[in-house]
Amino acid sequence: MAVRFLSHWGYFAILFAAFWEGEAVLITAGTLCGAGLLDWRLTILAAAIGGSAGDQIYFYAAHDRAARTIKKSKRLSKWYPKISKFVLRHSTVAVLLSRFAAGLRITIPLVCATAGMPARKYSILNLVSGFAWASFWVAVTYQIGARLPVS
């Protein structure tokens, strides 16, 4: 029953779950790939698209809301110029590595959007980062699943 569910709905579940939460989903999915229950290529594709879509929404939502929030907050107004300069100066590296650093997955898209990073540049980097992130976690956890006894 579970195998049948995975073969029909597993990739959709990964896509949807990666939209919200990443590593826990990919650890489980990668292990299932190693056990032969999911295809690693489709798993990476679903996770990369789901994770990237979530971050893309954060990026576009920030255009409207984050700028107003920064202006209203004295603390954010003080620190934001320094943070935005740093992120824009190192924008490529910041976006590519944001998925791999705790707490930055949501922060970096918001700062990039409000600091004026072009949407096209962010979108391309976001998708590349999504595939690198999904590939890393699936490759690492695949090894765990390959060692599990599956009957």
Image (spheres, grey):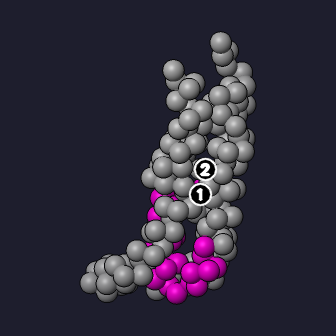
Which residue has dot 2 on it? 46
Residue type at the position of mark 2: Ala
Label 1 sits on a secondary structure element that is helix
The kind of secondary structure the magenta stretch mainly shows is helix
Q: Residues within 10 Å of mark 1 (few under 14, many from 20)?
A: many
Give how far across and how far down residue 116 sits, in percent: 52, 87
Vertical placement of 82 versus 59: above or below? below
Q: How many marks?
A: 2
Q: Is residue 109 visible?
A: yes
Closer to the camera in the image, 24 or 13? 13
What range of the chain is rendered magenta?
A: 99-123
Spot the residue most to the left.
Answer: 72
Q: Amino acid at mark 1?
A: Ile
Q: What secondary structure is found at the residue carrying circle 2?
A: helix
The image shows residue 63 at horizontal and vertical percentages of 42, 81
* Residue 146 on image: x %, y %: 72, 25
Q: Is residue 70 magenta?
A: no
Question: Looking at the picture, does residue 97 appear above or below residue 109?
Answer: above
Q: Is residue 139 left or right of residue 20?
A: right
Badge 2 crowding class, 10 Å Cα cut-off, few under 14, some 14 to 19, many 20 or more, is many
Tell me the residue that label 1 is attached to.
Answer: 49
The label shown at residue 134 is: none
Above or below residue 110? Residue 131 is above
| Front residue of this view, candidates 93 and 124 | 124
Residue 74 lies, with reference to residue 4, above or below; the image says: below
Residue at (70%, 49%) from the top-left corner?
Answer: 135
Residue nearest the viewer, comparing 35 with 8: 8
Q: Is residue 102 left or right of residue 34?
A: left
Marks 1 & 2, CB-CB < 8 Å contact:
yes
